[in-house]
Amino acid sequence: MGRRIQIVSVCGAGVATSLMAKMNIEKIAKENGYNVTVNAADVGTAAGMQCDVYVTTNELGKSLRLPSYNKAKVVLVHNLVKKSDIEEQLIPVLKELTEE
């Protein structure tokens, strides 16, 4: 495994959906050999969190107001609880981050 990648899963309230996404992201990372730490947050709190990647929905991505100094990647998915949707968008970003 390479360097540890910090990920924040973001939903509207930071409770149920982001926690389900967190579990799926952890499974995806493990299955593909990536070393990650995943936190769940609501859209307001997430912008102030330090991470390498934010994972959220297309709709909430518009509400995610990141400061200009925040260079984290934002992965947008159609369905935040569907593992295949997350995997399809997240794996290329994880690959890119581990090759840096």
Image: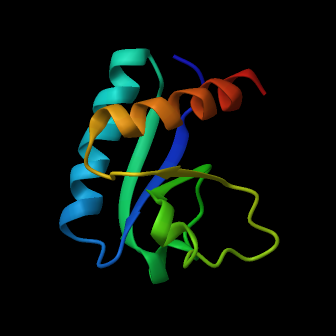
The answer to whether residue 42 of the structure is visible from this angle is yes
Looking at the image, residue 65 sits to the left or right of residue 69; the answer is left
Is 11 rendered above or below residue 25? below
Residue 13 x/y as whole percent:
29, 79
At a point 58% along the width and 55% down the height, the residue shown is 51
Is 18 rendered above or below residue 25? below
Residue 45 x/y as whole percent:
46, 79
Looking at the image, residue 75 sits to the left or right of residue 20; the answer is right
Q: Nearer the viewer, residue 72 or 57?
A: 57
At a point 42% along the width and 43% down the height, the residue shown is 37
Looking at the image, residue 85 sits to the left or right of residue 66; the answer is left
Q: Quadrant of residue 17?
A: bottom left
Is 41 rendered above or below residue 20? below
Q: Nearer the viewer, residue 7 or 13?
A: 13
Q: Quadrant of residue 2?
A: top right
Q: Nearer the viewer, residue 21 or 78?
A: 78
